[in-house]
Amino acid sequence: MRPLIHPSIEDITVEGILHVLSDPVRVAIYAQMANAGCAFNCTNFSQVSDKTIPKSTLSQHFRALREAGLIRSERHGVEMHNTTRCKEIEQRFPGLIGAIMNAHAVQMTEQACASKRKSAAKPKIA
């Protein structure tokens, strides 16, 4: 089994964080983890933003989050337990994760409202 790569806090960059969180699935996964504050298995995210995500794709997303330094993963048998490194990142880049998570929440709210308006505007067939 290959060892898991967790960069030291000094090796984490703003550019790396922004790049990894530019993917809508990864930012949704990270936002849910950051808001919950507990460990998650990859399979907890088989449904993200009403999309079914294959296990192999989830593994790639979690690897990207881990290698950017946003999460820490530990193997427990066949499962991988993932936790955020929010506190460490907050010490290195104060306010960065909070700003990204706030912007993501605003965007999700706006998308939900736009979706509701769009479905309400559709003519109903009698």
Image: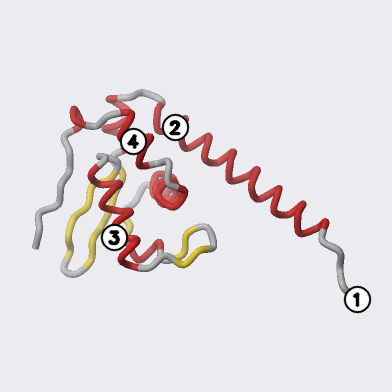
Amino acid type shown at disc 3? Ser
Label 3 vs 2, first from the N-terminus: 3
| CA distance separating discs 4 and 3 | 18 Å
**Residue kind at label 2, given as amino acid type:** Gly
Residue at 76% across, 54% down: 118
Quickly name the residue at label 3.
59
Q: Which mark is residue 17?
A: 4
- Spot occupied by residue 30 in the image (x, y as percentages of width and height): 39, 47
Can you give x and y, in whole percent of width and height, for residue 70 in the image? 30, 41
How far apart are the two marked residues, 1 and 3, measured between alpha carbons?
A: 46 Å
Label 2 to label 4: alpha-carbon separation: 13 Å
Find numbered disc 2 in the image and state the secondary structure of the residue it sits on: helix
Indicate the position of residue 85 as horizontal and vertical percent values: 28, 40
Residue 43 vs residue 114: left or right? Answer: left
Mark closest to the chain's N terminus, 4 or 3:
4
Q: Nearer the viewer, residue 60 or 98?
A: 60
Residue at position x 29%, y 56% in the image: 60
Q: Which mark is residue 98?
A: 2
